Each structure stands twice: as structure tokens, then as C-alpha cells.
């Protein structure tokens, strides 16, 4: 059985969902929304979320979505490449340029490249403080030792990729 753990983390709370399935059949096995007091550090909110996850759901691929308020930069833009491999080769440099003004030593950058219907590629880029990223990784590794963090993205970008026909304001 394939299991994915999805975590959405914002300034005042978040949500956690576990999706299980085989082949094309998937179902939500667990879902919970969390509210944290204003001013609560994101790590403390994530820690509460992970501590309340039932033991039977503590294995799987973890995907994390951060609120733009927690990010140094979040951007989505098209590039004139038909090949994802070509776009991936230059994506890192483009992301650093789009997030200008952030210190390279203090900031972690990541991006994903998807083929767009218009024969171009869409790059979704995020940058966050290295301290926050390390805190997220450490908390997940300590609470879910069998899990693997595979994606950190901005919430509006995930919504936009899931609902392609809709128009989302990012930022």
C-alpha cells in the first residue's frame, strides 16, 4: 500500500492528512486541522501535529506545504523550454534570481519543474530560512523515522497545480 502524509503549515495552524491507496484508488485515511495560538512558532505547531498522528499512520512519504507567510520567497513562472530536463538544468539559477535580496547563506531554495500544456515548462520555486527548513526536517525525522520528506512548496502553488482551471493569486 502506498501512503502519503500531507502537512500544510501556516502561522496560526495547519492541517495534516494521510492518503492511502494502491494503483488509481486512493482514500483519505486520516485528516486533522490544527489551530495554534498567534505567535506560536511554526515548529511548535508542527510538533503538536506530528505528536497527535496515530502510530499506524507514521510511515510514508511526507509532503510539506508552507504558507507564503513562512517563506522568504514563493514564485511560479514559465520558461520557454519544451523539456523538463532542460528547465531543471537552469531552474536553480532562475530561482536565486527571483528571490533576490535574500541571503544565500541563510536561505534554502528549492523548485519543481512541470511541463505546461503550452509546450513550455512551469517552475514553482520556494525559498525559506535554512533554520526553519532544518527544524521541519528534524521534527519529522524524530517523530516519523520511517518517513521521507519529498516536497516543500507554497500552499497557493499546490492549489494552482491541483486545480489548473482556476486562477489563484500567489503571495
Image (spheres, rainbow, N blue to C red):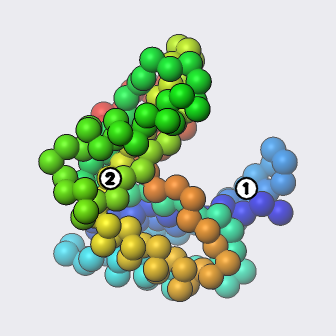
Decide: is 110 above or below 143: above
Pick whichever, 86 or 102, lies toward us.
86
- Quadrant of the image containing the C terminus: top left
Q: CA separation, marks 2 and 1?
A: 31 Å
Residue 67 position in % (x across, y down)? 33, 55
Residue annotated with mark 2: 127
**Of marks 2 and 1, which one's residue comes earlier in the chain?**
1
Decide: is 118 above or below 65: above
Left or right position of 118 against 79: right
Decide: is 83 above or below 25: above
Q: Quadrant of residue 149?
A: bottom right
Q: How many neighbours does mark 1 have within 10 angstroms: few (below 14), some (14-19), or many (20 or more)?
A: few
Q: How many marks?
A: 2
Tag 2 secondary structure: strand
Tag 1 secondary structure: strand
Pick whichever, 101 or 15, lies toward us.
101
Residue 170 position in % (x across, y down)? 30, 38
For image coordinates 56% across by 19% down, the residue present is 82
Q: Which mark is residue 27?
A: 1
For image coordinates 49% across by 35% down, the residue present is 89
Decide: is 50 above or below 126: below
Amino acid at each position: 500500500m502506498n501512503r502519503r502524509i500531507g502537512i500544510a503549515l501556516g502561522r496560526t495552524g495547519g492541517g495534516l492528512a494521510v492518503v492511502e491507496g494502491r494503483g488509481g484508488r486512493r482514500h483519505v485515511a486520516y485528516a486533522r486541522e490544527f489551530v495554534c495560538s498567534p505567535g506560536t512558532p511554526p515548529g511548535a505547531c508542527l510538533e503538536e501535529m506530528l505528536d497527535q498522528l496515530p502510530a499506524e499512520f507514521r510511515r510514508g512519504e511526507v509532503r510539506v506545504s508552507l504558507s507564503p507567510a513562512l517563506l522568504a520567497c514563493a514564485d511560479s513562472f514559465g520558461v520557454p523550454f519544451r523539456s523538463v530536463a532542460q528547465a531543471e538544468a537552469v531552474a536553480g539559477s532562475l530561482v536565486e534570481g527571483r528571490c533576490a535580496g535574500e541571503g544565500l547563506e541563510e536561505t534554502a531554495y528549492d523548485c519543481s519543474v512541470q511541463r505546461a500544456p503550452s509546450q513550455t515548462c512551469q517552475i514553482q520555486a520556494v525559498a525559506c530560512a535554512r533554520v526553519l527548513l532544518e527544524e521541519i526536517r528534524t521534527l519529522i525525522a524524530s517523530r516519523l523515522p520511517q518517513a521521507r520528506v519529498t516536497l516543500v512548496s507554497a500552499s497557493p502553488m499546490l492549489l494552482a497545480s491541483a486545480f489548473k482551471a482556476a486562477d489563484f493569486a500567489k503571495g
